[in-house]
Amino acid sequence: MSTQYSAAHSFNKVMEILDRYDRSESKIIPILQAVQEEYRYLPQEVLTFIATSLGVSPARLYGVATFYSHFSLEAKGKHIIKMCDGTACHVRGSSKVIDAIRTRLQLSAKKITTDDMMYTFETVSCLGACGLAPVLVIDDEIYGQITPEHALALIDKIEAEEKENA
Amino acid sequence: MRKLEEIRDQYQSARALCKKRIVVCAGTGCIANGSMKVFDALKNAIALSGLEVTVSLKSDNPEEHKHHDVYMVGSGCQGFCQVGPLVTIEPNGIMYGHVKPEDAAEIVASSVVKDEVIERLLYHDPETGAAYKGVSEIPFYTKQQRTGLKDCGNVDPQNISEYIAHGGYFSARDAYTKYSAEDICKLFQESGLRGRGGGGFSTGLKWNFARIEDNAKKYVVCNGDEGDPGAFMDRSILEGNPHSVIEGMLIAARAIGADEGYIYVRMEYPLACKRIRYAIKTAEEYGMLGDNIFGTEHSLHIQVMEGAGAFVCGEETALLSSIEGKRGMPNPKPPFPAKKGLFGKPTVINNVETLALVPVVMQQGPENYRKVGTAKSPGTKTFALTGHVANTGLIEVPFGTTIRKIVFEIGGGVLDKDGKINNDAFKAVQIGGPSGGCLTREHLDLPLDFDSLGSIGAMVGSGGMVVMNDSTCIVETARYFMTFTQHESCGKCVPCREGTRQMLEMLEDITNGDATEETLELLKEVGETVKLTSLCGLGKSAPNPVLSTLRYFKDEYEAHVKAKYCPTKTCKALTPIFIDPALCRGCTLCKRVCPVGAISGEVKQAHVIDPLICIKCGACISTCKFKAIS
């Protein structure tokens, strides 16, 4: 999946997605989910295109896209790291891991993607794996009972793999 | 369609040809601990030992039934997440915990080929060291009463025949062929089943409101938007026994006369979405879903909708807006969804756990169901037991069970700050997540049910139960919950949007040492106002964690405000960092790492920190090799 957005090719994909959901206004959320799956975020041009196709105002679509935390209007990094900050993870020390990762990647609560577009780091409210708290997810792989040292080691590993493949 | 009895009998005869059955937990927790690698390693080890193994028991065609030495199943969550990955070997009922792929060969040689037990892989009581053989012996399980979760973690969630062989879909068939819609509503009113999503409203009554609406189109919706941090029973049920949810929806649909259903699942639960989708597909193939269900004129079509990450969508009217493709904002009630719900049609919304209990209630009958639990809250309730407790996991107990039994017996005791079992370290149990409250030592013997919890300012909520030891700062925890609800407030009504923000700012002031005694008064006043005047359940319950801790931990709040001191040393701003001169060797390491130059001292002499310069970054604490700084 390319993170680059190339206009001509991608609108075909959007058309396909729109057709899959019968261009129905009530399917806005699944449509946006499918589009985000394709581009990893919701490019503005695509949002406008979808609004026109569905016959709704761009504002209506923008309203939905900004309401739900899953949707991103900005491009995300190649590797997506999510730290669970649910109650169970919180009382078992997720804050320390969050601080460690943010320091390491030079990110903050506001700035979540590294400048080289390699990492996006976000906190999520609960992944439902509370038995393993605190929990970290890197590119959909779940790691339980994580410590700051363990988390940094996992990032080191990605870094090493990236260097090898470069 | 084929008769359920035929499917059941065929499954059982195919099953009888398998000598042993190995269940590997494939719930999210165990998968994260590597259970799928264990599954593959066991499968390979069995094949290497010359035994014949199958991972999918096909029972539909009796001519294809054949002998298997081992039948392997990846089950849903077995609840004892602490000890995962879990492997159970039947018929002996041996349960192994913390199994690694390297253990596979030994397990096969000892417990599959032969019938020997591997002592070191059994569950050992962390306190006494005693070994327990399996589910029938381990106190974590024997002290529970698993009803809704009975098959969750045992049946293969991907095998509909296995669910049917365990008595599944028989209740749904009865609902469509033997009972009238009115009978079903009456039966559930008599059973006293109350919604497990938080509110605790009578399920039968809710159905009846939708039933009496005269409308050709009605909907049944399953609320699987389990947003409460610290609760994961809905995820476990959807992953471990998805057919029970579908059967519950079938019965609900029959009770109200709906022909279309939605299952709304959080997108954070990809495995649950996958399993429930697969279960719907097979149920359709077998004629349990779709048109002409069980040969009747009724139909029910179910779709899965993935949420997009908004906590407020757990509120029923907000969830309906979300299904309609809108911003997930709640609407004033009345009109209740039973009158005017999804797309303006009468709609019943039930929580996942409630729906999974529906077939159980029908199987048991209302009288038997009422025998368990308390008079006003019959039956059992699932809790997600997490935090500072020895056995974390998913448990199910009758209503009326005490916290003492749950935390100290089933949970195996409280973990202190060093991770050792020490029940004296117990501080509080936070129940019901961001909508609930804290229970303290004085509530240890309170029988838990909907009404008793309500009376002390907490709520069952979705059943998240987070145990906190004495190293947890209650004020910081209240601040944490307020950050959560403030962030998730949808912004539609003023009390919730502005009130939670004000409350959060006050809590931040308290934890930063900027608050006065008036702040506490104001915090309480604002909290009560938000509770009274907010539009939906989110705002109405958001102040609970604050109000309940203000009530039971007043001293701790006052220490933060008056003495500017955090007793647990959690709030950095209220915890002076100092060097213990008796432990300091004067190595100068801390002085060198201090980013603001707050530390002074000569080589081989005790160093000191200037509290006026110190920014409490903690760099010195982690650097000190002699643990002299705290």
Image: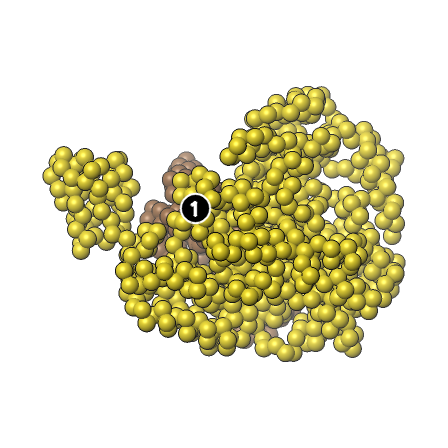
Given residues A101 and B192, the one toward you in this image is B192
| Residue A148, placed above or below residue B362 | above
Which residue was labeled with disc 1? B425
For label 1, the SS is helix
The scheme the figure's colours follow is by chain
Residue appearing at x 45%, y 48% in the figure = B426
B618 vs B556, left or right, is left
Question: Is residue B279 visible to the viewer in this orientation of the structure?
Answer: yes
**Left or right of A52 on screen, residue A103:** left
Q: Residue at x 70, y 23 (%)?
A: B115
Residue A67, percent across and down? 50, 67
Asked whether residue A89 is in view, the answer is no
Pick the front one: B521 or B498: B521
Task: Give residue B458's position: percent from left, percent from top.
Answer: 53, 63
- Front one among B361 and B231: B361
- Amino acid on which disc 1 is placed: Ala
Task: Answer left or right for A16 relative to B547.
Answer: right
Chain letter, colour brown in render: A
Toward the viewer: A48 or A76? A76
- The answer to whether B425 is drawn above or below residue B234 in the figure is above
